Image (tube, rainbow, N blue to C red):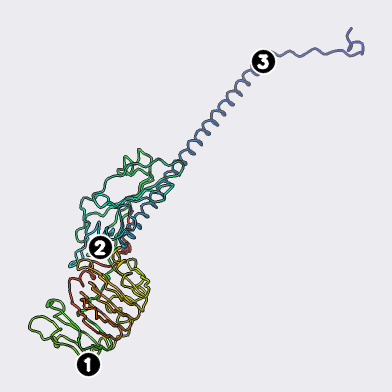
Amino acid sequence: MNTLSRLGVTPRPMPRLRAGAHRRQTQSGAATLVVVMVLFLIMAMMAAFANRNMVFEQRIGSNYYRAGVALETAEAGADWALAMLNGDAINAACLPAGAISNSFRERYLGIVSTSRVVSPIRLDNKPVADCVRSEAQGWVCRCPAAAWTPPAAPPAAAANMQPSFQVTFPKPIVGNRPGIVRIIATGCTSSTLSDCEGVEIARDAVVGQSVVSVDAALVSALKMPPPTPLTVKGNITLDANGIGLHNSDPKTSQGLLLQTGDADIPNLQDARLESVPGTPGDLAIIKSDPQLLAADSAKMFAMFFGMSAAQYSRQPAMRQITCADDCGPTLAAAYARGVRMAWIDGPMSINTTTLLGTPTSPMLVVVNGALNIDAALQMTGLLYARGNASWSNTSGLQALLTGALVVEGDLNIAGTVDLWYRWEVMEQLKNATGSFVRVPGSWWN
């Protein structure tokens, strides 16, 4: 007898499942398993879809990043080219060089001084210069004097991107305004420029490419050239040698020799006054000029340069020159390294024989104050003094300014000094010298 019987408990028999109920239970479990498997399949598909979207978004983000880098690189290339157009003499690495080289502008652009037309020297629409971003050296550039060739591929970047750009000056556009040049900068996220030479190549190489085009206009160094070799607002004092004034150009300035606010100029020597044939020297002089007498210093400056002195001194191609007691060697060194527009906060003195400028590449010097020359200065260009000026030459050598001298104050001449007016020099300063600036609204990507 079992324990339950001894306790007086009668065990109840276990219920037996009928065959139909067992079958229904089995079917229910199978259906549940199918539902669970379907749910797992749906979840797996959702996970795969989400992962695909994440990968796709990562690719989009990467493409946006490369496109942004390429655009910024191309924009940097356009700004770099614009700055180089306003720079001094350079070498093949686009770095400052001495007199043995020429400037970026002279190397790649030609400017016709009579028509102001700017055109690239090379008309093959190929790049002229390029720069590659190096992890160790920063931007490494090439400015070849000969035809441009693709550079060798630099070592691959260890971790960071090495973008690059190349600059092209395309053929002049028909109907383009004089004084305008187009700059095309191609930015690439690869250090190998050939990766970005074509759209298909760029797509296959998974690199970003962007092309930026801007127009640059030449702001003239001399808006309104003086019509005479000598222009003086104040009084003129000459010693017994007088002053040599020469102007044989009948087309543009009618042979004028002097324009001044002074009413009486003693010691003018007829033998040293040379105008166009048939015109006596004293008839080529304008005294007591009402326009000069009515103009103050600011107005007189704007009359020739088309802007205020403060604006003119800050333009990109202008160089601020600081001189010691004798500014002659400093100016000669500046001209040798490519400076064509110099601003000196006066007073300025030149006490040694100095050579500045050539007919095809004259120099413009503005002295913001008094000017004192005690030497045989030989200069081609424009010398502008915003104060009083004196020029003494007792050296026995020739003191000659080929171009023009403009003085806002009084002028004192002693010894042998000659001023020879050349309209070709004035055209060079007006149409081929100055600063390149962006044309508003010309940007295109």
Q: Disc 1 to disc 3, how far (Cα)?
A: 136 Å
Q: Is residue 43 left or right of residue 307?
A: right
**Along the viewing direction, whichever of 241 and 433 lies nearer the viewer:** 241
Q: Are marks 1 and 3 in contact (CB under 8 Å)?
A: no
Badge 3 marks a residue whose secondary structure is: helix
Badge 1 marks a residue whose secondary structure is: loop
Check disc 1 and report the residue beneath it: 264
**Along the viewing direction, whichever of 50 and 376 lies nearer the viewer:** 376
Q: Is residue 331 above or below residue 295?
A: above
Q: Disc 2 to disc 3, how far (Cα)?
A: 95 Å
The tag earlier along the polypeptide, 1 or 2, is: 2
Q: Is residue 349 above or below residue 25?
A: below
Q: Residues within 10 Å of mark 1 (few under 14, many from 20)?
A: few
> Quarter-wise, where is residue 435 in the image?
bottom left
Give me the residue at 36% from left, 52% from top: 74
Q: Is residue 440 above or below residue 223?
A: above
The tag earlier along the polypeptide, 2 or 3, is: 3
Q: Amino acid at mark 2?
A: Ile
Q: Amino acid at mark 1?
A: Asp
Q: Disc 1 to disc 2, how far (Cα)?
A: 45 Å
Q: Residues within 10 Å of mark 2 (few under 14, many from 20)?
A: many
Check disc 2 and report the residue beneath it: 180
Q: Amino acid at mark 3?
A: His
Q: Is residue 255 above or below residue 358?
A: below
Q: Residues within 10 Å of mark 3 (few under 14, many from 20)?
A: few
Q: Residue 393 appears at what percent x and percent y?
A: 25, 80
Q: How many marks?
A: 3
Return the residue found at the far left: 278
**The N terminus lies in which quarter of the figure?**
top right
> Quarter-wise, where is residue 4 in the image?
top right
Check disc 3 and report the residue beneath it: 22
